[in-house]
Image (cartoon, rainbow, N blue to C red):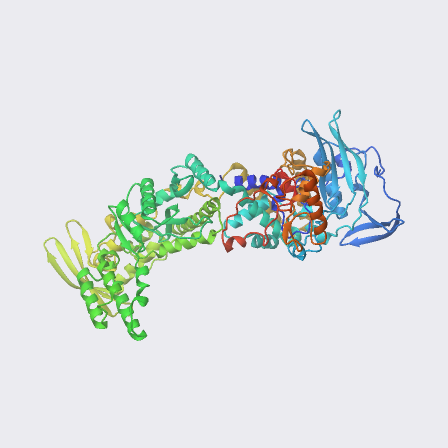
Amino acid sequence: MDKSELIERSEEQRYSDSDVFVDATSEFDINFIDTHGLIEHEPQSSSSAGQSSSSMHTITEPEPDMTFFAFEHHGGVSSRLFLTPNGTKFWKPNVSDSIVPVVGTVFACWEDVVSLYESYAEKAGFSTRLGTCRVINDVITSRYILCNRSGKPRFKNYDSTNPETLSSSRTSRSLLCGCKACIRAKYDPETGFYTLYTFVESHNHELIGKEFMEFSKKRRKTDYTTHQFVHEMSLNKIGPNVAHRLQCTLKGGHHNVRGTTTDYKNISRAIRLFIGDRDAQMVLDTLRARTENLHNFFFEYSIVGHELRSLFWADDVSRCNYETFGDVLAFDATYKTNKYCMIFVPFTGVDHHKRCVTFGAGLLSDETTESYTWLLERFLQAHVKQPRLVLTDQDSAMAKAVLAVFKESKHRLCMWHIMRKLPSKIKGDDVQNNALRKSIHKLVWNLILDESMFEQQWKMVIDEYGVSDNDWLQSMYAIRSDWVPCYFREFPMCCLMKTTSRCESSNALFKVNSSASNTLLQFLMCFDTAIDGQRYNQRKMEFETNMTTPVLHTHTPIERQASMIYTSTIFKEVQKELDRSAYHCAIIETRTFGNKKVYTVSHSNRHFIFVNQFEVIFDMVDRTFECSCMCFTRIGYLCRHVFHVFRSNQIHEIPARYVYARWKRNALPARVHDIANRYSVDNSEAGVLRREIVDVVSQCTDRLRREPERLATLLNQLKDIKKTYFRNSSLQPPQGIRNKGCGTDSRLIGPGEKAIEQFKKGPRMCKKCKKLVYDHDSRNCDKIQAAKRAASNVDGTDSAGIDGHRTPSDDINPVVPPPVQNVGPSAASSSCSRPVRATRRSVRLAGVSPAP
């Protein structure tokens, strides 16, 4: 499932289950935000919407006798205030006659009716909502459009004798005030048109000024673009609050943004609730779809007892990267990337720009040897060949799995994890500790020493500081061949990675986008976003390499050749070696043994002080060169000592055998950078066209930014286009679906049902009989108990349950709340500060009538 499909489907669920996402701290009654069915249209005048059969504003509903009192003005909205003889106030909008609804007006479709009244309401200063609807043969035959403050407020009855009920209750306010303003339209089956037959103009409340219209229902209704924005921000670890602030900044203020921060939170929560318990299945379906639609995509998973336990995936780009740069592999586990606490294991390498590159990723339910073995086997199944060198930390489960699966690879432990423990493992004063640490660091990080020299100097350091009895140092010396660099100096590319710091860097990259409250599907999308960022940096380096010309220092043929075959990053390293070969090296001695020449080359530092000397062996038959510093073996390009011998032998090009394929410009196939391999991009035809339209409009507004008149002309043209497409659009989201059996307010309720509803109230403690009861308190305890005893004596019923305690058989249709998963404090930051309580409507949708 891609991101656009997830947003659309969660948006549909949000429309149909709108009451689930009501703000817990909202002051509006549930009827206000009950329906999301208003259709966004550009306002139309009655003349454009249809023909009027009358020029009078006929009001079919009777209005009370009232007289004009005064004009009122609120933020650009004007209204006429009327008073009845008993002092009741009514307000009538003071707007242009061209936008006032006219009884008898004929409309071609229902959307035009809604558009007309919404346009009128926006100018008049109130919001609307859809009322009673009659549908015959899937055609709306009659419907009301009401002022959003119509209806009677529902207030909860509180027990004044129990202060706990007052302190624990929600202090919400109701928006409803019984306003009668509305319009009604009916369908004419003969003509196929809608006719406006009722218009009530008067409101029993003040109208909203323009400065407060941003809080109206219509302005709070969010669209698909807003949902997409909130979702994409979440993929970059930007929560709803910050996303709303960004929108306010981008659009020039809060009044230009649809929805409040609470609406943005509800959007984010709607996506999470839409995923729900289908999380793991949706992830598998998404990866399975990629296997079918993307070239060379691979994924495997394991299930234990219907639970997802292990998962591995790698796409074509990752597999191409491993084919070229998979000689050295590092992997490490990271945590807090999803709400299920599954362990995330990315596989990391180094590309030809010396940047981190990901070869694949996995999710594990635990860190056992069996889990890591399964993961490495799936990795090997996807990439076939084994790496030369595998780098991990000191985790024993990882080590056993590496030895079991990568039998042809050399396992190496991270030096950094070992050396950072050194201060806590040795005793003594600070001065001695510092000196010992410096000596050990200088020894173990030395790349020039061979194995025998390292062992001799290690013993000298241990004896000098008297730490021969230190158990930790002895244990680290016992496994020295697994982590000390001198034991890997003859191993190809051994110095490419000596620590798992690149794994830490990759983990930090993924955590920038992900959080511990994410579902697995959201985590997968965050992973895609992070991977796209990593590959963007790789493409950027490719562009700089191919489209820019480096500055040459010596202008020699060998330097020019190096600039054309290596990437820009590697060329800088090779260029340093070429420069130092000219100024910091000299041939001290030359010896000949048959077909071989041995050059002794001095090595000086940047201050031209002699540091060391190395031997370069030149085979004159095979035309091969070998330096005792082993730079080419360790890192993959020639050293300054060999370049100095090139200069003395008039060799002006780097032999092909000394150009490592992984460092070349064209190391990767061209398809790696294809746009189709970018997950964060909507590559669908509709998505591409939407982005292009937005770009074209943005370019036009940029071009006309200093010409207000032409900008106004462009705006009018866009509005005309909007009218055309909205009028022709017949497909709308679900409008507050009410299922069978959900009940209506107009249904007659019998006394039996009322008794059951009353009985569902929570029990109270009677201070007199000291029992939790439903039907009395201390004021009428004696009376109720006497009546129960009298009824028991007359009917002969058993006394069990008479005292008011509820028995299991008394429960009728118990409502079991859905399980709530605790995702820690980080999840609380991405949702409302207070839990959302079930509303009347949400309970009715469950098929159970709420308690009054």
- Left or right, 534 with respect to 96, comes to left
- Where residue 506 sits in the image (x, y, percent)? 39, 53
Tell me, yes or no, if residue 668 can be seen here: no
Q: Residue 469 falls in which quadrant of the image? A: bottom left
Q: Name the residue located 74 percent from the left edge and 25 percent from the top edge.
A: 189
Left or right of residue 13: residue 102? right
Image coordinates of residue 693 in percent, x first then y, are: 58, 42
Single out the residue that lies furthest toward the left. 594
For the C terminus, give its image quadrant: top right
Question: Horizontal and vertical percent for residue 834?
Answer: 59, 53
Q: Could you tell me residue 771's position as x and y percent?
A: 63, 52
Dividing the picture into quarters, in which one does residue 733 lie? top right
Please, is residue 189 above or below residue 25 in the view?
Answer: above
Residue 470 shows in this picture: yes
Question: Which is nearer the eye, 245 or 825?
Answer: 825
Question: Where, by quadrant of the figure, is residue 694 drawn?
Answer: top right
Q: Nearer the viewer, residue 583 or 420?
A: 420
Q: How many marks?
A: 0
In the picture as drawn, the residue positioned furthest to the top comes out as 190
Q: Is residue 808 above or below residue 73?
A: above
Front one among 377 and 58: 377
Residue 842 as seen in the image, left or right of residue 290: right
